[in-house]
Amino acid sequence: MSIAIRDVTKRFGSFAALDGVSVDVATGSLTALLGPSGSGKSTLLRVIAGLEMPDSGSVAIADEDVTRRSPQDRGVGFVFQHYAAFKHMTVWENVAFGLKIRHRPRVEVRARVAELLALVQLEGLERRYPAQLSGGQRQRMGLARALAVDPHVLLLDEPFGALDARVRTELRAWLRRLHDETRTTTVIVTHDQEEAMEVADEVVVMNRGRIEQAAGPRDLYERPANEFVMSFVGQVNRIGDAFVRPHDLELVLDAGASTREAMVQRIVHLGFEVQVELVRDDGAPLSVRLTRDEEERLELVRGDIVHVRPIRATTFS
Amino acid sequence: MAARLGLRLVALFYLAAILVAPLGLVCYRTCAHDAGAAWAALHAHATVHAFRVTLVAVAIAVPVNAVFGVVCALAIVRGRFPGRGFLNAFVDLPLALSPVVVGAALLLLYGRNGWLPGVHVLFSLRGIVLATTFVSLPFVAREVVPTLREIGDEQEQAAHTLGASGWQTFWRVTLPSIRWAVVYGVVLTTARCLGEYGAVAVVSGNIEGRTQTATLAVQDAYENLDRAGAYAISLALALGAVLVLVAMSLVRPREARS
Amino acid sequence: MVVALPIAALVWSSTKGGGSGFWAAVSSPEAVAALKLTLAVAALAALTNALLGTITAWVLIRDDFRGKPIVNAAIDLPFALPTIVAGLLLLTFYGPRSPVGVDAAYTRTAIWLALLFVTLPFVVRTVQPVLIELDVEMEEAARSLGARPLVVFRRIVLPNILPGILSGLTLAFARAVGEIGSLVLVSGNLPYRTEVASVFIFNQLQSGNPHGAAAVAVVLLAISFAVLLGVGGLRRRATRHDCGR
């Protein structure tokens, strides 16, 4: 089920959370809405869900205009950052909720809940209350609950934001696998560019209520539309008008054509890669990424004077 | 949404029907029709005396219960003696009792055939003060206890390590941190004292000009068909109540913040 | 000195006539009628306020309109106003010279109205904090799952505010059972018809029967205690799913 957003504007008082936003989400894709806080990504997600009504513009799901429809009638599944678990119901009752209020036969409900709990790996925990689960378990329950009613579209609002780093990484990979299996059109909101790049087919970068660029992760990284996207999506060195990625800076020991002098400030070992932080002769900071082997060959030490040259640079008009 | 408006109307209508309309009506009828008689009634000797009795009771009961409340709260929250829970329940006791039961208890203790027949308490100002103090006992303690619990005793520990004595710590650290809770409790206590009827009715003998409180005077006036007088005293007391409400709304956010 | 001794004297006095004396005082037809009336009307008033008080709390927390802070402050009027004044006000509005033509003076309805006044703040004030704490996202989740507003209220909101409603209800009931000031003028105190337990006790004291009065007073005392202990128990049971990690 595709989603089509056209010229949506939403204001809260004088603050424009969304300013004429248009975006397309392809059926069966996993799209990430990426941006800093206040960029409007959560608002856009809630507008898609019907939890907020836009001031102007339209929202269409599966080619049907749902702009003025209530959330109950949109066929969306919503997963909240802080789980929104029904704390007075057991895990089983939480997941069964959508089916129970649709008055599904008991047999069907039981089968579907069991199927979903197995899918999210929460079997055996049916009778627990949310307060007795870990954050990661609660979020998996939230997902199972949303999936129970076979939504056309699955919407996740910073679903892993409240979890610690390791659980986050695990669930990220798990979500991707789940999506590959179910193929439900999914939109995930995140402020973590690593998460977006890792998980999504398409990333929509937002800033201050507007869309900066919508593209696949690779295109976003290698062909950013503007300075904001380039700096948001990865580390960037600014050299005059040009922007250079840390791994696109060559580091040599002797001066040469088009090199600039710089002094080594810090060497950070990040496992496979090494990040070398330098200060240029004019005081500007630089960040260079080398492989472990390259760094070993250069035998760098704090205080060394070296020479850098951009291999590839990007400029924006 | 229609439902939202509907609920709002239900709530506002209910409040109007029970609270606002009756009060408004009495205000209107007294001020519009009986203003002269009402004013005269307020100046009558018996009425003035009744107010005086009430105010004396308030003037004694409130400070006593304020001090007692703070001491009790400290004992309940910071104390380390067996029976703390008991003390907590005891302090809450007057809230659970019907005022008449309180009056009956006092009557039976200090009455002619009671346990302490020698102590002259009944049918006098002393009895009124005692009854009023009893029924308004819990309020300061109940406000201070949760505040003390929330604040914790770290500040006091810090003061001790800096060399402050028990009294200094209390005066300079503890008391300032609970002051709004105390004020709020005092406001509630005052309201309760002003409004006490049942216990005082039993204990005082309701002797006009001697042991009649303002609340008893209202009943007396009404039963003697002095409607204007009854309304006048009532409105005076209601004015006091409104002032109490204003004080409550002003102090409550300060209490919550501390 | 102020609390324990008088209560002890009361309890002791009620047993003055022995077990049979106590029983006789408590089971006299007038006493029984008074107690039954008290319990019935107090329960009715508490339940009425449970419903209307919850609605009021909902409107005060979820709705917004001009003058809301004043309305919120006005809820405490029954706490601040002397009960006898409350009785007089209600008698004027719902009595012989009522501007809305409702003359309920000296009837059981009048008792119910007075108890409504006196117990109004209880449920409102216990439900408000629970409503504030309520996670709005639970309701949003329910809506996104297809639940209509009434279903959301019944299955999501109500179970979570029920502890607040119940504790307010029981506090209101305990309060109503002991009420006297507002009833003295309003009910007419007709034995077997509109005489509540507190007034009965008062009359017994006035007619020089302190031990009979004490007996019934002890019954009221016991009821209040039982109700208050019940509040604690109900709260613990209703919030059991909040424990855990």
Image: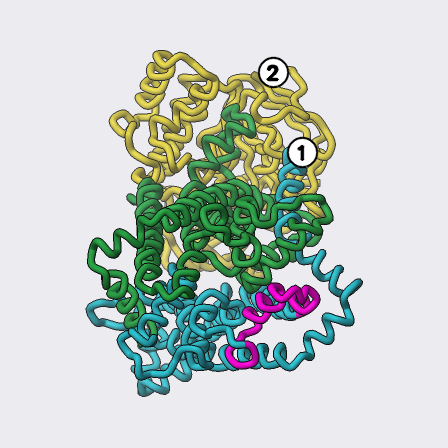
**Residue C214 in view in this figure:** yes
| Dot 2: element | loop
The chain ID associated with circle 1 is B
Reply yes or no: does residue C243 show up in magenta. Answer: no
Q: Nearer the viewer, residue A248 or B110?
A: B110
Q: Colour of chain C?
A: green
Mark 2 highlights which residue? Answer: A62
Which corner quadrant holds the C terminus of chain C? top left
Q: Residue at x 35, y 37 (%)?
A: A130
Q: In x, y percent, where is residue B38?
A: 72, 70
Q: In x, y percent, where is residue C68?
A: 65, 52
Mark 1 highlights which residue? Answer: B1
C-beta proximity under 8 Å, tags 1 and 2: no
Q: Residue at x 58, y 37 (%)?
A: A41
Query: Mark 1 and mark 2: span between their CA atoms?
Result: 28 Å
Q: Residue at x 45, y 81 (%)?
A: B124
Q: Quick check: C232 left or right of B175?
A: left
Q: In x, y percent, where is residue B214?
A: 57, 73
Q: Nearer the viewer, residue A267 or B3?
A: B3
Reply yes or no: does residue B222 show up in magenta. Answer: yes
Report the magenta residues as a range.
B208-232
Note the chain letter of the yellow one. Answer: A
SS assignment for the magenta stretch, majority: helix
**Residue A218 in view in this figure:** no
Q: Quick check: A92 left or right of B242?
A: left
The chain ID associated with circle 2 is A
Q: Residues within 10 Å of mark 2 (few under 14, many from 20)?
A: some
Three-letter code for the amino acid on which mark 2 is drawn: Ala
**Number of numbered discs visible in the structure rendering:** 2
Which corner quadrant holds the N terminus of chain C? bottom left
Q: Quick check: C141 left or right of C100?
A: left
Q: Give the foreground label among 1 and 2.
A: 1
